[in-house]
Image (tube, grey):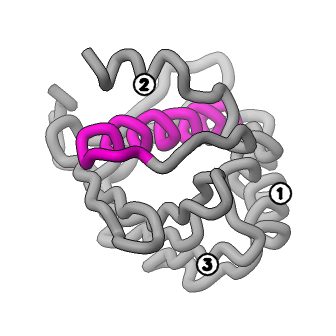
Amino acid sequence: MLAFVALSILPIAAQSTYPMPETEEELHQVILHLDSLFWQAYNTCDADKMGEFLTDDIEFYHDKGGLTETKEVLLEGLRTGLCGNPDMHLRREAVKGTVEVFPMSQYGAIISGKHLFYVVPTGKEEFLDGLARFTHLWQYKEGYWKMARVLSYDHGPAPAGFENK
């Protein structure tokens, strides 16, 4: 019940401040909530909203694309690359049962798991394109939660007939 109450009073955007959760369960709920808000922005290609969840000195490590440093560079890459094609975009979905949250003492939290990517062509039905692993380091600083390090790796095709149940 406490987790439900905590989620109901969580801020809508990352820029609102609130205290560090006192228990691991509360931390788990907060990070899952913020993670879901980030991916909502990703799935709609809202780069400005995505930026609210990133530190200025973010480091994004991608096994196929290498290292991207700074929020400004990462967001520009999203705007012109992933979100730059008006005829299609990607939709990300966590693989059920794989997402875990771990406290990071004196810093924040780590979230990791597997995720799926769907190609969403304009005017056509989306299709499953790939499967990868992710690890995100969330920093808690002065009442704000932001992603400071992002690792996206082990990219490959999704298994034939895979259903996310």
Q: Is residue 110 left or right of residue 158?
A: right
Residue nearest the observer in this picture, 113 or 161: 113
Numbered circle sitting on residue 80? 1
Numbered circle sitting on residue 59? 3
**In the rendered structure, which segment of residues is drawn in magenta?**
21-45
N-terminal-most mark, 3 or 2: 2
Residue that appears at 81% across and 53% down = 79
Residue 36 falls inside the magenta stretch: yes
Eyeballing the image, is 154 above or below 22?
below
Residue that appears at 54% across and 45% down = 19
Q: Mark 1: few, some, or many residues within 10 Å (few <14, many ≥20)?
A: few
Q: Is residue 115 left or right of residue 77?
A: left
Single out the mark in the foreground, 2 or 1. 2
Q: Mark 3: few, some, or many residues within 10 Å (few <14, many ≥20)?
A: some
Q: Is residue 6 left or right of residue 79?
A: left
Numbered circle sitting on residue 55? none
